[in-house]
Amino acid sequence: MPKPLSAQTIQLVKQSVPALAANGADITRRMYSLLFQDDHIRELFNHANQGEGGSQVKALAAAILAYAQNIENLSALLPVVERIAHKHIGYHILPEHYPYVANALLAAIKDVLGDAATNELLEAWGEAYWFLADILKEREADIRSQLESQQGGWTGWRAFRIEKKTRESSVVTSFVLRPVDGGLVARHKPGQYLTVRLTLSDGRTVKRNYSLSNAPNENAYRISVKRESTGQGASRYLHDAAEVGTILEATPPAGDFYLPDEPQNPVVLLSGGVGFTPMVSILETIASEYPEIETHFVHGALNGQTHAMDRHVRTLASQHGRATVKTFYSEPLGEDAAGYSHDHDGFITVPWLENNTPFDSADFYLCGPKPFLAALVGGLTKAGIPSNRIHYEFFGPTEDLLAA
Ligand SMILES: Cc1cc2nc3c(=O)[nH]c(=O)nc-3n(C[C@H](O)[C@H](O)[C@H](O)COP(=O)(O)OP(=O)(O)OC[C@H]3O[C@@H](n4cnc5c(N)ncnc54)[C@H](O)[C@@H]3O)c2cc1C
Ligand code: HEM
């Protein structure tokens, strides 16, 4: 832990919160235009995804503002620190990158607040920034050293070859990735994601997170990708252009959403749409390693055509013996019939979970689109499930999720 912040710094940072919040958008814009003057810093970010108005771009500035608002209660930020540190590992952010953000942030505060940005205030912000930066750097150093010492582990970008491409549904295709160097891979934690760097057909390079959909192992990773018809095209490239033999790069598995090493409670896996991917990794792990853990795999899909990996999931559940599978279709097609192709029409609801899962003892793992998470994370919380039994992943920037 770095040296505690002085009382004066806390006071000054706190006093500046209203002005920063009122000018948040301007400060963010200014900060990024300064930060991205440096090409090598610009390249660390995920431009194809963002543009300067993009929500992921705002995440860093929003985190800094949230930090200022919580400066007297920093323990509230610890879960966020863990999530950010893993994100940074995925994007290969190193200690030497931190001064660039410090300089851009302080210069942006100065430019936007004008005379109100006294030297005293800027010094306080500098101290506060480095306090948070040091916590992140320390945690990131720990994760990196663990990855370096782990069998098959590495840091930074490593080349992988697509070994297998499998259509899982009308919208989802899986890719098995093996290192080009022929070495082993680091065992991931079931639920974690890989960050991949792709060069699209038009030459643009993009970085994307994909949850691993297979159980931890030393040989290969599998990702399962939904084709998005709009957007910058990473998923379209993977579906339409990438083939067996295509090379892409990846940083090691990261992410703070995973099944713990020794699960104790029953497990309820709740997914919507392509959010099934980390759940399949968890279910594969439970099926092979934890025969005693009661498990419920509950999935919501649009219909039978978009529903991926159903047979695989049911096979895993029957091998396990103490796992159930229930599926909900929100837009069933003519050929879909509740009781045959799927279990229920409509959406997964909290009352259904109360009646059909070990509600009072289970750990709930959730992943899906924003409305799915908003309804179920909110609903479980309202129904009295403590936050330490609700774990969720979201396939986008935290900023977007919080807005929902
Ligand atoms: C931790 C994590 C795990 C993930 N795991 C998976 C997975 O297992 N499988 C999977 O398929 N995907 C996963 N994703 C999502 C994945 O990273 C990509 O976002 C996805 O493949 C779409 O990429 P794309 O380039 O095709 O489209 P994008 O360019 O990312 O666009 C996707 C959609 O967002 C919209 N959009 C793009 N930019 C903006 C913007 N600035 N504002 C508003 N809307 C915008 C687009 O119109 C489009 O509808 C994961 C994401 C995260 C963060
Ligand atoms: C105290 C300092 C920092 C804070 C508080 C911070 C905060 C954040 C947050 C909140 C996210 C989004 C996480 C999510 O969506 O879950 C993020 C992602 C990211 N951060 Fe940081 N960050 C800091 C420093 C840095 C530095 C120094 C760099 C590099 C110069 C950097 C580069 C990135 C990148 C590349 C991402 C991934 C998002 C993307 O562009 O797609 N961050 N950070």
Image (cartoon, grey):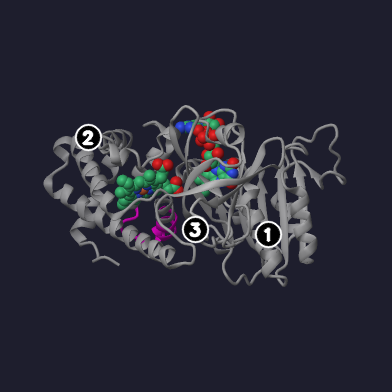
Q: Residues within 10 Å of mark 2 (few under 14, many from 20)?
A: some
Whole-angstrom CA distance, mark 1 to mark 2, is 50 Å
Q: Nearer the viewer, residue 41 or 343?
A: 41
Residue at label 1?
283
Residue at label 2?
112
Q: Secondary structure at mark 3?
A: loop
Highlighted range, magenta: 69-84
Q: Nearer the viewer, residue 334 or 250?
A: 250
Tell me, for residue 46, which label it has, or none: none
Q: Secondary structure at mark 2?
A: helix
Q: Secondary structure at mark 1?
A: helix
Where does residue 244 sit, x and y in percent of width and height?
61, 41
Residue 149, compared with residue 8, is above or below; it is below
Q: Is residue 17 visible?
A: yes
237 displayed left or right of 331: left
41 displayed left or right of 153: left
| Labels 1, 2: front one | 1
Q: Residues within 10 Å of mark 3 (few under 14, many from 20)?
A: many
Whole-angstrom CA distance, mark 3 to mark 2, is 35 Å
Q: Residues within 10 Å of mark 1 (few under 14, many from 20)?
A: many
Work out whether mark 3 precedes mark 2 in sequence or the reverse, and give the earlier one.
2
- The amino acid type found where label 2 is placed reads Val
Question: Which residue is rendered at x = 66% and y = 45% of the image?
Answer: 272
Q: Nearer the viewer, residue 124 or 225?
A: 225
Work out whether mark 3 precedes mark 1 in sequence or the reverse, and give the earlier one.
3
- Residue sitting farthest toward the left: 119
The quarter of the displayed image where residue 308 is located: top right
- The amino acid type found where label 1 is placed reads Leu
Question: Which residue is rendered at x = 28% and y = 46% of the image?
Answer: 17
26 displayed left or right of 87: left
Residue at label 3?
256
